[in-house]
């Protein structure tokens, strides 16, 4: 059950990274998102939930690479963050 839920959240993170890159008109690189960190924390309702931080790479120009991050709490996206980049 835990593995199935983790894979569902991973897919949610990948899709969120792709959508954000498309919306910002940058290229999502390597089509991979990597889990960098996870921890237990209390949710807004006081229950223990898992917070995950995924990392991915993108490029605005096809030449340089920048880091992006997708954060989830339980089974929801809490933030998608793109490293500041220079637009051409």
Image: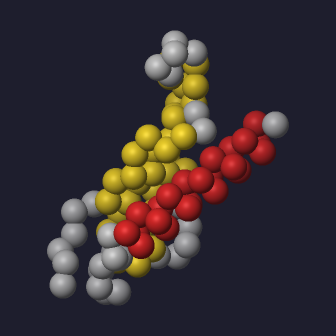
Q: How is the image coloured?
A: secondary structure
User: Going by the image, does 80 lie left or right of 37?
Assistant: left
Residue at the outermost top position: 46
Q: Quadrant of the C terminus?
A: bottom left
Q: Position of residue 36 (x, y in %)?
A: 50, 48
Residue at x 56%, y 67% (from the top left corner): 32
Q: Quadrant location of the N terminus?
A: top right
Count of numbered circles on the image: 0
Residue appearing at x 19%, y 78% in the figure: 87
Can you say whether 55 is above or below 57 in the image? above
**Outermost residue toward the front in this view:** 23
Residue 9 horizontal/vertical position (percent)? 63, 47
Q: Is residue 14 visible?
A: yes
Residue plotted at (76% across, 43% down): 3
Query: Which x, y percent locates residue 49?
Result: 58, 25
Q: Residue at x 69, y 49 (%)?
A: 8
Q: Quadrant of residue 48?
A: top right
Q: Is residue 85 left or right of residue 58?
A: left
Q: Is residue 5 above or below residue 88?
A: above
Look at the image and tell me whether residue 58 can be seen: no
């Amino acid at each position: 059950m835990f593995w199935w839920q983790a894979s569902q959240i991973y897919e949610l993170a990948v899709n969120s990274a792709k959508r954000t890159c498309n919306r910002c008109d940058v290229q999502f690189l390597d089509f991979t998102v990597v889990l960098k960190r996870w921890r237990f924390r209390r949710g807004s309702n006081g229950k223990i939930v898992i917070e995950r931080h995924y990392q991915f790479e993108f490029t605005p120009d096809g030449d340089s690479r920048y880091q992006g991050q997708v954060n989830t709490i339980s089974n929801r996206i809490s933030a998608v963050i793109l490293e500041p980049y220079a637009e051409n």
